Amino acid sequence: MQDRKSLFLRRGSAVRTLWSRRDVKEAIVIFGAALIGFIVVVQTQLYEALDAYLISHDDWHLDDVLLVSAITSIALVIYGYRRFRDLSNEMRARSRAEIEAQRLARHDPLTGLPNRRFFGQSLEGAP
């Protein structure tokens, strides 16, 4: 009985570890966006209208242009999402570093006690 419980706990830990990975989350977001796009296209019958338009204008060779633009737009959405995530992580790291730098400027790094600068700033702020 104990072996089954420990096996279940290990599996749960593996699932939590899998969900915490960035690439897994991004893949889920991309798959979800593609699924929503597919549902919208099916519900609005956009594919049939686009297919009829391309058949009626077969001599224009628009199907190649539409395919390239669709692939490019998907790539740009993925790139934009990843870039947004990178920038938000960088902003959080910078904010934490600035707070830590301010704390280190007013406290002794070894003991953690306030230093002369902290005392001077506190004295200036006192009424």
Image (tube, helix red, strand yellow):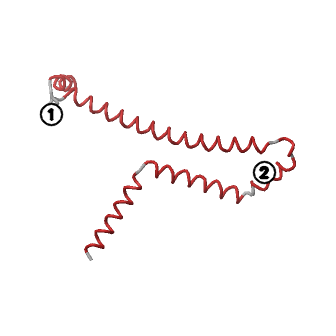
Specify the quadrant of the image occupied by residue 60. Answer: top right
State the residue in front, 85 or 9.
9
Viewed as shown, does residue 29 lie left or right of 62?
A: left
| Quarter in which the N terminus is drawn | bottom left
Q: Nearer the viewer, mark 2 or mark 1?
A: 2
Secondary structure of the residue carrying tag 1 is loop
Can you name the residue that lies furthest to the bottom here?
1
Looking at the image, residue 98 lies above or below residue 24: above
Disc sitting over residue 112 in the figure: 1
Pointer 2: what residue? 50
Disc sitting over residue 77 in the figure: none
Q: Position of residue 15 (x, y in %)?
A: 39, 60
Q: Residue at x 20, y 27 (%)?
A: 106
Looking at the image, residue 3 lies above or below residue 10: below
Q: Residue at x 40, y 35 (%)?
A: 90
Three-letter code, disc 2:
Leu
Three-letter code, disc 1:
Gly
Q: Dot 1 surroundings within 10 Å: few (below 14), some, or many (20 or more)? A: few
Specify the quadrant of the image occupied by residue 87. Answer: top left
Q: Position of residue 67 (x, y in %)?
A: 71, 45
Viewed as shown, does residue 81 lie left or right of 121?
A: right
Viewed as shown, does residue 60 lie left or right of 74?
A: right
| Mark closer to the chain start, 2 or 1 | 2
| Quarter in which the C terminus is drawn | top left
Q: Position of residue 25 (x, y in %)?
A: 47, 51
Distance Cα–Cα, label 2 vs label 1: 68 Å
State the residue in front, 32 or 9.
9
Q: Residue at x 60, y 56 (%)?
A: 35
State the residue in front, 102 or 66.
66
Secondary structure of the residue carrying tag 2 is helix
Q: Dot 2 surroundings within 10 Å: few (below 14), some, or many (20 or more)? A: few
Q: Position of residue 41 (x, y in %)?
A: 70, 55
